[in-house]
Image (cartoon, rainbow, N blue to C red):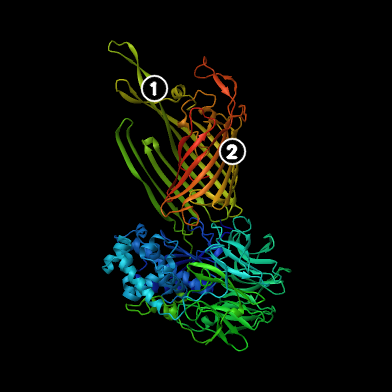
């Protein structure tokens, strides 16, 4: 959803159209010039020239980037940028750190080149060839081209794989993306290729892979198979890491309090309370979301879940990736930043019960992170992104006054108060940006700001390294921080009085969060240290006292990145990528005269065109037939306006259908309209007689087998709108006018083998079949409240809720009302989910019986009562008992993820994904004049006239609930469809001795 309307402008450069709305013109122009530098660097490897200007859509911050309309679906907090394939649109936000913004731009522009190469590089490839390229190749190339081989963070991942004897083959990376993160392992692979064979081999391998797949592509380029290349890469890594002078058997310092045994695999952003009693951390312990947990800092026992985005209506998402919260000085409250209603907000909760105490926005700061609570308890500090710049702010909780401490174009990040509250230590890139460095890197140094005077002092330590997550010691004499100064990721201590620097840990992997900039260190007022340790592709939280560490004094001016270089250490081939990245700032920037304002042009173009195949049938009893369809979508460059169009045929010329729909997504309200003509086909067969004459001219009656094909044509124009209150709740309003008409054909075949087709008039069809086949026109207006925060599992929702409360008014040739109430709740008690649904749809009014009655026996409502399964329609409870103008349904299921992902399903499987369900269904169908009774068998009520045969009145019975229970298996067929075979025991049916099998083609409700 979109919380506000954004007014985009456009800057044009030689190769790009940069769409923006940010008011900071200096920053936007900087990015426009940066994009041209990235273009020049990437072009040297891709050897490709853009034939048209590539669009870049820039958002001012991540919360507004998550509201983009340029792509479909939701964007999570962990997505830094997106490149859309069909129009090669690069969509990205301004990040909190200048280096991240530069890196994301360079990374996404690699994808723009990749898509253009496939679409425009010749007649040998098309965009669909991207399906031949593994994700680790696509994303790894983008990381390698924008970072290079010097990357301490990726090197930490590779050392961990080496330590675990789990360096993957290329096949394992392709088949198990969840285990081997494509970005990190793909970057390491391309670094190996570039260093061993030269960067000039990258494009031939990329193109060959697109054409033939990676295995054949490797064979065509290198002359040997993929397994051989895997072994060579593995040997290179083993040789490089075997020689590192670090004791790999050394255990981490302290006690592991949070790990995969008592929590999840992802335990990050730890924050210890000032008294050292509690630790708050983020974890996917409950599998479906990243939640905030509270644990005993000494034992690791999890006390409670402090809050969850699945249960807290004020919370759209946690800012967990590169942010941590803070305890109040008395350790009774906890403050952290959350995404809520389109921006970051400060949430404070009561530690004792998890109750939300306040949720407050910080003025016009749409994104902020890394909360620090002052020792006096009155203020909190954070790093806030405003107008493209990340600065340090403090907020007084009592007076509600927001004060900006820094105001410049440097990135100021991860603030932390001194114990006396007079100073704040933070990470910043001011030294790097003042140094005149040539490299693409913009590393972070450490600085201290005086809260009263706002004077800033830079700490002269490890210039050129990333120094992050600084914390004051309990007596304010020292600063603890994390640094990659030696190519690893360790904790250091800086003594303010003497400028002495000590290395506190020496880990082969490192102290780290999900990204290099994630907070992973926290100190109490009693010198308790908690940190997030990366090992075995997991993040565990450790607790230690300061005196448990073994400090080693190091030179604060020496930086050595040998361990940060991805293997192999030597470059044997042509080194284009790393040479360019090392001299990034030496490339000539375009002048301001080449960054020009141009008018925004929607550039309404085709997004995609697809077909459903084509079929042709001839020579059958029903004559010739054709089947096929085509659909497409058009949109403008920002996705504000979208047009959907579809045509389809399935049968004869009468079975042509089509629809054109328009949706406007520019503002918070989504609105649009559609025009459609849709044929619906139904039919049945019956024995009959056909009047004819014999050879003497006498009339005779010949037995026939008749098939009636009934076509209902709906021609409709509609309008609709939706106003979302949040990501989980919305209000809908719509209206339509529709004309319904019919065509009935009777295909007959007589006793002697002759056959043919008759088109029946509407009157004749009504007499033979029953019902009214006259065309009619009807108008309707509708409104609904809708809610949905359900978390979908393998084949059905497993946690959360869904609801729809709606009303419709029909008028025109028929007048009646319709009401909808649909309530669904899913409670998970690992590994089971208890799912409950209560649903009703009712027609009411003068003409409620005019349309075809509702049928209760569809398997997505209740199972065991399908229309085709009834064998006896003469009993008191029969097929007619399942129809009416009103239906009500109650369902209860126990859902068990049966086969699938390891942590979710009972049986691990990489191919078969299924849920096993035990169900109980109940349903009732009735009319306004029906007598409803809650009994196991219906009682006789009376008779009504039979319009077809007045001499044979129709018996009327009570309407009773239809009950069934049984077991089902929902199978997810590779995301294409969900199949549910089931066995049900229908308690009200006496035409089956035991149960009945059935098949449902739908996800679980």
Q: Is residue 34 above or below residue 294?
A: below
Q: Earlier in the sequence, mark 2 or mark 1?
A: 1
Task: Inspect this view and state whether residue 1003 appears.
Answer: yes
The circle drawn on residue 318 is none
- Image position, residue 141 (x, y; %): 39, 68
Q: Is residue 313 above or below residue 79?
A: above
Task: Inspect this view and state whether residue 857 appears.
Answer: no
Residue 362 location, quadrant: bottom right
Towards the viewer: 106 or 184: 184
Towards the viewer: 233 or 43: 233
Quadrant where the N terminus is found in the figure: bottom right
| Crowd around label 1: few <14 · some 14–19 · many ≥20 (10 Å) | few
Q: How many numbered markers are drawn?
A: 2
Left or right of 14? Residue 787 is: right
Left or right of 300? Residue 245 is: left
At horizontal 33% and vertical 69% (from top left) the residue drawn is: 231
Q: Is residue 739 above or below residue 235?
A: above
Q: Residue under label 2, please give it.
A: 840
Towards the viewer: 307 or 205: 307
Residue 579 location, quadrant: bottom left
- Image position, residue 88 (x, y; %): 42, 62
Q: CA distance from mark 2 to mark 1?
A: 37 Å
Q: Residue under label 1, please give it.
A: 687
At horizontal 59% and vertical 88% (from top left) the residue drawn is: 499
- Image position, residue 295 (x, y; %): 63, 65
Left or right of 870? Residue 704 is: left
Residue 471 location, quadrant: bottom right
Q: Secondary structure at mark 2?
A: strand
């Amino acid at each position: 959803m979109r919380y506000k309307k954004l007014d985009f402008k456009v800057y044009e450069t030689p190769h790009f159209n940069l769409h923006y709305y940010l008011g900071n013109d200096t920053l936007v122009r900087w990015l426009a010039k940066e994009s041209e530098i990235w273009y020049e660097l990437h072009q040297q490897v891709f050897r490709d020239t853009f034939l048209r200007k590539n669009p870049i859509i820039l958002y001012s911050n991540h919360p507004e980037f998550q509201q983009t309309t340029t792509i479909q679906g939701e964007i999570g907090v962990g997505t830094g940028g997106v490149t859309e394939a069909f129009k090669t649109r690069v969509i990205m936000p301004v990040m909190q750190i200048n280096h991240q913004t530069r890196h994301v731009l360079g990374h996404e522009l690699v994808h723009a080149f990749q898509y253009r190469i496939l679409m425009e590089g010749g007649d040998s490839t098309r965009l669909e060839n991207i399906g031949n390229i593994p994700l680790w190749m696509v994303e790894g190339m983008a990381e390698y081209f924008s970072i290079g081989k010097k990357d301490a963070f990726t090197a930490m991942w590779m050392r961990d794989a080496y330590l675990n004897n789990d360096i993957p083959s290329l096949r394992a990376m392709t088949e198990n993306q969840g285990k081997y993160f494509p970005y990190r392992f793909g970057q390491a692979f391309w670094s190996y290729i570039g260093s061993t064979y030269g960067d000039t081999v990258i494009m031939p391998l990329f193109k060959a892979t697109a054409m033939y797949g990676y295995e054949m592509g490797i064979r065509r380029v290198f002359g040997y198979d993929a397994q051989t290349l895997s072994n060579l890469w593995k040997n290179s890594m083993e040789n490089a890491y075997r020689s590192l002078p670090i004791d790999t058997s050394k255990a981490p310092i302290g006690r592991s309090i949070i790990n995969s045994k008592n929590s999840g695999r992802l335990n990050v952003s730890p924050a210890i309370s000032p008294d050292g009693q509690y630790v708050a951390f983020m974890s996917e312990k409950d599998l479906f979301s990243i939640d905030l947990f509270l644990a005993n800092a000494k034992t690791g026992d999890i006390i409670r879940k402090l809050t969850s985005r699945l249960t807290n209506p004020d919370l759209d998402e946690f800012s967990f990736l590169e942010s941590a919260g803070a305890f109040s000085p008395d350790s009774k409250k906890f403050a952290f930043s959350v995404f809520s209603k389109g921006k970051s907000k400060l949430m404070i909760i009561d530690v004792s019960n998890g109750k939300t105490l306040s949720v407050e926005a910080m003025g016009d700061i749409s994104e902020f992170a890394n909360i620090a609570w002052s020792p006096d308890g009155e203020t909190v500090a954070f790093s806030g992104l405003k107008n493209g710049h990340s600065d340090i702010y403090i907020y007084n909780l009592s007076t509600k006054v927001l004060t900006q401490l820094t105001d410049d174009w440097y990135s100021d990040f991860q603030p932390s108060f001194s114990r006396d509250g007079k100073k704040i230590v933070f990470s910043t890139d001011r030294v790097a940006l003042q140094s005149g460095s040539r490299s693409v890197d913009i590393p972070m140094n450490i600085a201290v700001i005086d809260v009263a005077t706002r004077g800033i002092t830079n700490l002269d330590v490890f210039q050129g390294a990333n120094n992050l997550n600084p914390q004051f010691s309990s007596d304010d004499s020292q600063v603890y921080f994390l640094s990659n100064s030696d190519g690893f990721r360790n904790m250091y201590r800086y003594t303010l009085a003497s400028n002495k620097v000590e290395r506190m840990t020496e880990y082969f992997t490192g102290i780290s969060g999900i990204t290099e900039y994630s907070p992973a260190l926290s100190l109490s007022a009693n010198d308790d240290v908690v940190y997030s340790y990366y090992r075995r592709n997991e993040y565990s939280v450790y607790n230690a006292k300061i005196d448990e560490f073994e400090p080693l004094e190091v030179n604060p001016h020496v930086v050595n990145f040998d361990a940060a270089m991805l293997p192999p250490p030597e470059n044997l081939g042509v080194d284009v990528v790393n040479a360019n990245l090392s001299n990034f700032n030496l490339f000539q920037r375009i002048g301001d005269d080449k960054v020009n304002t141009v008018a925004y042009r929607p550039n309404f173009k085709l997004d995609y065109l697809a077909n459903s195949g084509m079929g042709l049938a001839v020579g059958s009893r029903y004559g010739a037939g054709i089947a096929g369809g085509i659909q497409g979508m058009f949109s403008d460059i920002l996705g504000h306006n979208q047009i959907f169009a579809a045509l389809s045929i399935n049968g004869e010329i009468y079975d042509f259908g089509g629809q054109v729909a328009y949706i406007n997504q520019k503002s918070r309200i989504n609105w649009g309209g559609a025009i459609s003509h849709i044929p619906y086909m139904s039919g049945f067969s019956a024995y009959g007689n056909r009047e004819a004459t014999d050879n003497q001219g006498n009339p005779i009656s010949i037995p026939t087998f008749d098939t009636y094909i009934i076509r209902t044509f709906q021609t409709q124009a509609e309008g609709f709108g939706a106003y979302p209150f949040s990501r989980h709740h919305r209000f809908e309003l719509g209206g339509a006018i529709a004309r319904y008409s019919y065509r009935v054909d009777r295909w007959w075949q007589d006793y002697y083998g002759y056959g043919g087709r008759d088109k029946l008039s509407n009157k004749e069809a009504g007499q033979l079949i029953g019902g009214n086949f006259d065309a009619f026109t009807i108008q309707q207006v509708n409104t609904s409240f809708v809610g949905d925060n359900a978390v979908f599992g393998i084949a059905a929702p497993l946690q959360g809720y869904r609801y729809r409360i709606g009303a419709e008014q029909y008028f025109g040739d028929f007048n009646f009302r319709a009401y909808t109430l649909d309530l669904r709740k899913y409670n998970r008690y690992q590994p089971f989910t208890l799912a409950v649904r209560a649903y009703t749809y009712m027609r009411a009014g003068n003409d409620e019986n005019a349309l075809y009655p509702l049928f209760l026996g569809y398997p997505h409502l209740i199972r065991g009562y399908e229309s085709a399964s009834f064998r006896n329609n003469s009993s008191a409870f029969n097929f007619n008992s399942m129809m009416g103008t009103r239906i009500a349904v109650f369902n209860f299921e126990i859902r068990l993820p049966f086969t699938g992902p390891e942590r979710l399903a009972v049986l691990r499987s990489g191919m078969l994904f299924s849920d096993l369900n035990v169900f109980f269904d109940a349903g009732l169908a009735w009319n306004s004049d029906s007598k409803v009774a809650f009994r196991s068998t219906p009682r006789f009520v009376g008779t009504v006239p039979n319009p077809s045969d007045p001499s044979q009145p129709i018996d009327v019975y009570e309407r009773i609930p239809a009950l069934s229970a049984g077991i089902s298996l929902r199978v997810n067929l590779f995301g294409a469809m969900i199949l549910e075979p089931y066995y049900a025991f229908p308690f009200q049916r006496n035409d089956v001795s035991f149960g009945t099998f059935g098949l449902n083609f739908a996800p679980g409700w």
